[in-house]
Every structure is written in structure tokens, then in C-alpha cells.
Amino acid sequence: MISALLTPAQRERILRAATLAPSKHNTQPWWFRWDGANLEVHLDPERTLPVEDPDTREAHISCGAAAFAARLGYASLGFGTAADLLPDENAPGFLARVRITDAAPDPLFETLYWSLPDRKTHRAPFLETPIPPLFLEYMRDAARDEGTWLRVIERGPVYEHLLAVVREATERETDQRREERAKWVDPPDAVHRRDVVPARSLGPRPETPTGAVRDLAVGRDVSGRGTTAFEAAPALAVLETRGDTRTAWLTAGQALLRVLVTGTRYGVAASFANQPLEIPELREEVASDAKYYGTPQMVIRLGMGRDVPRTPRRPVTDVLGPE
Ligand SMILES: Cc1cc2nc3c(=O)[nH]c(=O)nc-3n(C[C@H](O)[C@H](O)[C@H](O)COP(=O)(O)O)c2cc1C
């Protein structure tokens, strides 16, 4: 039986990889369960954001990213893997089953595994060096290989339109959103937590807000942040899917992490400005510029990265459900 193939150390490695996935406000909205050698990814409804993410789209993206990270963990152990999305229609919170296949592991996945720990959301100014176009091509390939489209936006009217829509979304900030975010972004007990976005990960406040850098602390004074000049015109990209179903969200999550770790391998870092996607009519504005795949899932700011602080993760024992 295949389950005999996984030792406790191997299981821990796969689970650890899964927990390194990015998630909205570091909510880590997942729990996992072993079914033999398969790893099940489940949505944790206690860790969703009813105000900012009422349909749990972004929580699904986060869990899709965790499934992809688990696939890299399996590949690093020499296993070919696949992820079955929404495998049980009677269990809506059961989002993905990551399983071993007969195929040889993708050698690229083994390589990407080693970049997983270095991928961090980069809320700091990028280096001046522009991103070599070939690196962006690799990231586009990564998105395409997971069935999505990374629309890298050249400077011009579409670029300006996207920034304008992001700025408009920022202006539409509500007290309700701020209150919800305050529970996950630098909350008073952050030092004792292994989730949430700690103050050190907020990055400095931009001297001249362009819109591309999302200030998660918007409206709140977080001491010690300082103010810095950011790059005037960062590279922007939108990750798009075909359709907007739960499967599409999970696919977006897998693709997102594949794009991000591919970038990490070449020194390309990312932060996100998703606020327009959280407001339906502004999401439609972003979609109006979409070319091929139609449905925007993530707005990404890209550049050559520096070293930025790491966010914490809950230990694997905290994310494991009963077998
Ligand atoms: C679906 C999703 C949406 C996110 N949206 C934003 C965002 O709008 N702004 C932002 O600064 N970070 C955003 N993030 C990044 C998370 O805050 C980040 O992944 C989390 O804090 C963990 O930190 P890490 O990426 O450095 O590991 C998002 C991440 C995901 C997966």
C-alpha cells in the first residue's frame, strides 16, 4: 500500500511545505488530514474574512497555494503528484486531495521546492534593476502550466487604468473592513501568534503613494515603520482564470504559488494590491482590460527583491486534523 511509503519525517516535510503557502493576511485558512499517503486540504471556516472575502474566494486561493506547495514537498521526495480539486461534493470544505501518481516527479518541481522558504511578500521598495524580460516569461509560463494567465501589464493606458482602480478601491476603505483587518494585521497579541501579519512585515510607508503598494495598516499608526521612497512605476501583473468557480479559485491558488516561487528562483519578488478585486464593480473594471482568460484573481506588483522579514506559520501539529 502506498501509505507505507511515507515515513513520519516525510509527512512532516510535505506538511511543512504546505504551510509555507501565502494566505490572505496570513490567516492560514486551512487544515490538513492524512488519508494514507494522500494529503487532504480543508478550508478552516474559523479563519476566513466575512467582510473582505465574503464568498471565501481568497481563502480558496490560499488553500490552492497550500495544495501546490504540498505537491512540491512530494516532488522533493521523489514522488510524482497530482491535486484533485473539490474531490467530494458532499464535503464542500474538502478543497483538494494531493496524491502520489505513477509518473516520475517533475524535475522542475524538485527545484522549485528549494525556493519555497525564500518566497516572501515584499512590502518594501524593490531594487532599481529592472526585471529581465526572460524572468517574466518564465513566470508567465508557470501560470500557463497551471491553466491560468499572468497578464504582465506594459506601461501605458491599461497600466494607468489599473493604478487608478486600485487607488479608488483604497479610497473606498470602510470601518467594517478596517475593523476586520485589525484582527489580522498587527493585532495587539501579534508577538504571541504564529499567524497574522506582524508589524515588521508591513514594510515602510510609501513617501508618495502610487497605489501599487498596498498599505495594510491604512488609517492606523504602526510605530517604527518610517517612510521611504518606493519605485515610481513597478511592474504590474494580473493573474487571470477562465471563469470564477471554486475550482477556478483553487486553480488560481496553485498557479499563484507556482508563479511566485518561479520568480523567487530568479530573485523576482512580489507584493499584492488586491483591493479592487474585493469590490465587485471595481473587479469588473480590472476584468475589462483582460485579454484572454477574463477573470482577475490577483493584482501583483513585481520587482527584483531585497531581503524582507519572514511571517510566522502555525506549527504542523496545529494544522493537522484526525486521521
Ligand atoms: C489570496 C491572497 C490575497 C492577498 N492579498 C494581499 C493584499 O491585497 N495585500 C498584501 O499586502 N498582501 C496580500 N497577500 C499576501 C499575504 O498577506 C501574505 O501571503 C501573508 O501575510 C503571508 O506572508 P508571506 O507571503 O510573506 O509568507 C495576499 C495573499 C493571498 C494568498
Image (cartoon, grey):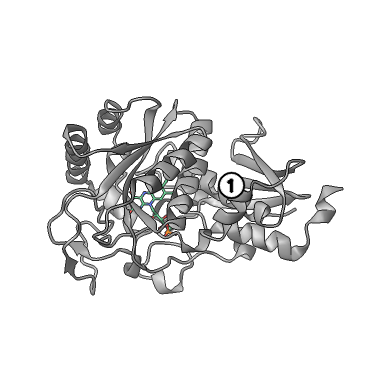
Residue depicted at x 51% and y 32%: 147
Left or right relative to 7: residue 44: left
Left or right relative to 26: residue 226: left
Front-most of 9 and 104? 104
Q: Is residue 18 visible?
A: no
On the image, the x and y values in percent for residue 29 come to 51, 51
Name the residue furthest left.
208
Name the residue furthest right.
1
Mark count: 1
At numbered mark 1, what does the secondary structure look like: helix, strand or loop? Answer: helix
For residue 45, above or below residue 6: above
Circle 1 residue: 67
| Mark 1 surroundings: few (<14), some (14-19) or many (≥20) residues within 10 A | many
On the image, the x and y values in percent for residue 282 come to 25, 33
Front-most of 217 and 151? 151
Left or right relative to 309: residue 68: right
Q: Is mark 1 within 8 Å of ligand 1?
A: no
For residue 315, above or below residue 299: below
For residue 86, above or below residue 134: above
On the image, the x and y values in percent for residue 232 come to 16, 53
Residue depicted at x 28% and y 38%: 153
Q: Is residue 203 visible?
A: yes
On the image, the x and y values in percent for residue 170 come to 21, 46
Residue depicted at x 57% and y 52%: 69
